[in-house]
Structure formats: C-alpha cells, structure tokens
Amino acid sequence: MDDAAQKITFGEMRAAGVRNVFIYCSDHRCSHCVTIEACADRWPDDLRLSDIEDRFVCTVCGKRGPDVRPDWTSAQTRPEKRA
C-alpha cells in the first residue's frame, strides 16, 4: 500500500451496525458513485476498506482504485437491553 491512510476494517464497520459502502470514482471529472448493500458481510473482520480499493474499476470511465467509504446512514441501531 502507498502513503494513503488506512481506513476502518469491515469488522469495525459491522460492530458499528454498518453494512453498506459507497464507492466513489477517483477521477474527479467522472464523479461516478455507487452504493453496495451488505458489502461488509462479504469480507473478513481484519480487512480494511483501503485494502480492497484497487480491486474496483469504474464502470463509467474505467479508472481503477476508487475511494471506498462506509455508508454511515445505513447503520442499524441495536435494540436496547431491558432489565
């Protein structure tokens, strides 16, 4: 990996109740964005979002290496425990 910052792990995402990710094309002129639902369920706990970025290619412009981010709006709240 280059000097890019390491991102959250899929295990940390699941622990926060987040299952979806946004994938943004890294070409600012393209700006294509997609949401992948339940993506966090497909990957091991210790894998970081930054570890999978080079696996994706933009379907609009063909650029490899998008920005992968958690979809925090998809976080599922845990039910409160009652005593």
Image (spheres, grey):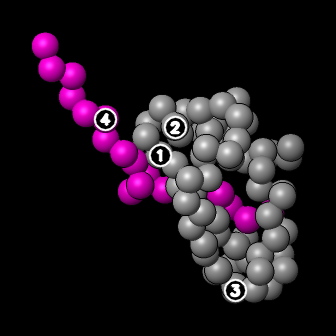
Residue 56 spot, x, y in % from top left: 80, 64
Residue type marked 2: Arg
Residue type marked 3: Arg
Real-space CA distance between mark 1 and mark 3, rounded to the nearest whole angstrom: 29 Å
Which residue is label 3 attached to? 29
Which residue is label 2 attached to? 14
Instruction: Say whether disc 4 or disc 1 marks the residue closer to the N-terminus.
Output: 1
Instruction: Locate residue 47: give its quadrant.
Output: top right
Real-space CA distance between mark 4 and mark 1, rounded to the nearest whole angstrom: 11 Å
Instruction: Locate residue 30: give its quadrant.
Output: bottom right
Q: Residues within 10 Å of mark 4 (few under 14, many from 20)?
A: few
Q: Main secondary structure of the magenta part?
A: loop
Magenta stretch: includes residue 17? no
Magenta stretch: includes residue 66? yes
The magenta region covers 65-83
Q: Secondary structure at mark 3?
A: loop
Which residue is label 1 attached to? 18
Real-space CA distance between mark 2 and mark 3, rounded to the nearest whole angstrom: 32 Å
Quadrant location of the N terminus in the rendered image: top right
Tag 1 and tag 2, C-beta contact below 8 Å: yes
Q: Is residue 13 left or right of residue 75?
A: right
Residue 33 spot, x, y in % from top left: 61, 75
**Please, is residue 48 above or below residue 62 in the view?**
above
**Please, is residue 61 above or below residue 13 in the view?**
below
Residue under the point 52% across and 37% down? 14
In the picture, the disc for residue 78 is: 4
Tag 1 and tag 3, C-beta contact below 8 Å: no
Tag 2 and tag 3, C-beta contact below 8 Å: no
